[in-house]
Image (cartoon, helix red, strand yellow):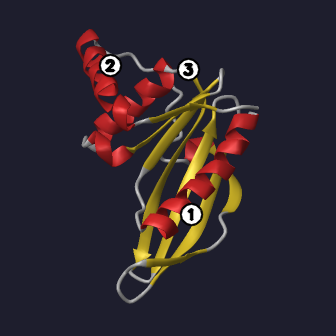
Amino acid sequence: MHLFAENLAVEISSYYRNLVLGHGVTPKVFTLVNGEGSQYLFFVDDLQMEKDQENLFLAYIVQAHEAVCYARGTLVIVEKNQQYIEFAVVDHDDADAIVCSAELTRDIDDKPIGLTEFEKTLAKKETIVFGGLFKHIQLSDAKTEDFESLWEEMKPKILHRMVGL
């Protein structure tokens, strides 16, 4: 597994802890890192797309930026009093993905008040719902232009930084 993937798992755990407990929000997050250490992070809900188009766009971004790993996270509600924040980090060159899960506790006003430590496990990346974003996609010229335009429109909302080894 690439060192970026392992670092990404630690980073996303901290990121979610800060967002949930510090700001009371639990967004769907997507981030990727390429071989030069350039990282992009954004909220998936900002895309405002149907699920199939969303996945196609994310695969396009992974391909266009030559990602070595990516992560996607969300809130999973089993029941009102049983909620988890879960994310997976998928590495280009590894058959396994890092899957992380932490239980979220809310008060009677539905405000987040506690988050357990993220437990990490390994899972085959083909078992991850969005684990196939590295698969090569062929888009029409029109679709490619649409996605390029959307990416440019999103740039002001995207966290972009360089990460080190």
Residue 76 place in picture, x, y as percent: 44, 65
Task: Please tell me how crowded label 3 is: few (under 14), some (14-19), or many (20+) other residues with Cα within 10 Å.
Answer: some
Confirm or deny contact between disc 1 and disc 2 (CB under 8 A). no
**Regarding mark 2 in the picture, which secondary structure is present there?**
helix
Circle on res. 148: 2
Q: Nearer the viewer, residue 133 or 29?
A: 29
Residue 117 vs 36, above or below: the answer is below
| Label 1 – label 3 distance at C-alpha | 28 Å
Q: Amino acid at mark 2?
A: Glu
Residue type highlighted by circle 3: Glu
Nearer-N-terminus badge (1/3): 1
Amino acid under disc 1: Arg
**Taking the image as drawn, is residue 147 in sight?**
yes
Q: Could you tell me which quadrant the C terminus lies in?
A: top right
> First in sequence: mark 1 or mark 2?
1
Residue bearing mark 1:
17
Q: Which mark is residue 66?
A: 3
Q: Earlier in the sequence, mark 2 or mark 3?
A: 3
